[in-house]
Amino acid sequence: MSSDFFDTSDYFIQQKNVYYNRYQIYNNRREGIGSIKLKQNFRKKVLKFIFGKAMLPFVLEIRSANGRLEASISRKGISLMSKTIIKDSLGQKIGRIKKNSNFFNYTFKILNVSDEVIAEITGDWKNWSFIVNDSSMTQIGTIDKKWVGAIKRLFKTSDKYNVHIKTNCLNENDKIAILSSAITIDMILKKCLLVRF
């Protein structure tokens, strides 16, 4: 069953539940098109008190409005060096995320299954401004909190951001990997900040 979830170029993400780490995803017509949720069982909830949140494995699920799994991002193993894996809706690995940091600046390299860099997200988390470049370092998108017009008036809470990205990748899996990484950037960053501080 095909999905058009990754065919749009604008995603508006708003945190809906702080305790359960749940985010709602909207399109530019203010329609709810999906959600992001941190999947955790009782065992993980217990382990976070032993090892701390930053050390724990995690699974972020991206689901469409009808509940269909679109993609997931996960880290396995209790290690800061564990790989962050991107999977498609069938659970097949389509890429991974490699993180580099320099004080307040972060770089997330998005790699395909052959470990080739297909995109890079760079920016300043303090000012919440990120640029998405493709493998040739051409800008293909932005991630920021500059919501405009009716969208800005609709959402009053502060924990929200906008992902604007071109979706004309030649490879479908590359497009899913890039968009999944951009859409979940807030949750991934919070894991990184816990490691640092």
Image: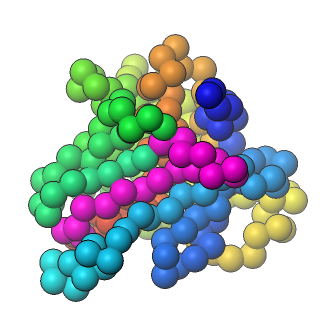
- Vertically, is 23 above or below 69? below
For this orientation, the residue located farthest to the bottom is 49
The image quadrant where one finds the C terminus is bottom left
For this orientation, the residue located farthest to the right is 150
Q: Which residues are magenta?
A: 54-71
What x and y, as percent, mark residue 133? 45, 32
Please say whether residue 146 is one of the residues in the magenta stretch.
no
What is the number of callouts on the image? 0
Looking at the picture, tell me which residue is in the foreground, 196 or 15: 15
The image quadrant where one finds the N terminus is top right
For this orientation, the residue located farthest to the top is 170
- Vertically, is 11 above or below 2? below
What x and y, as percent, mark residue 85? 30, 43
Please say whether residue 62 is one of the residues in the magenta stretch.
yes
Q: Which corner quadrant of the image does residue 114 belong to? A: top left
What x and y, as percent, mark residue 92? 36, 32
- Vertically, is 178 above or below 25? above
- Left or right of 83 on screen, residue 10: right
What x and y, as percent, mark residue 20? 49, 76
- Left or right of 35 on screen, residue 91: left
- Residue placed at 59% from the left, 70% from the top? 15
- Vertically, is 95 above or below 43? above
The reply to whether residue 22 is in sight is yes
- Residue placed at 60% from the left, 57% from the top? 35
Looking at the picture, tell me which residue is in the foreground, 189 or 46: 46
The reply to whether residue 163 is in sight is no
- Residue placed at 64% from the left, 61% from the top? 24
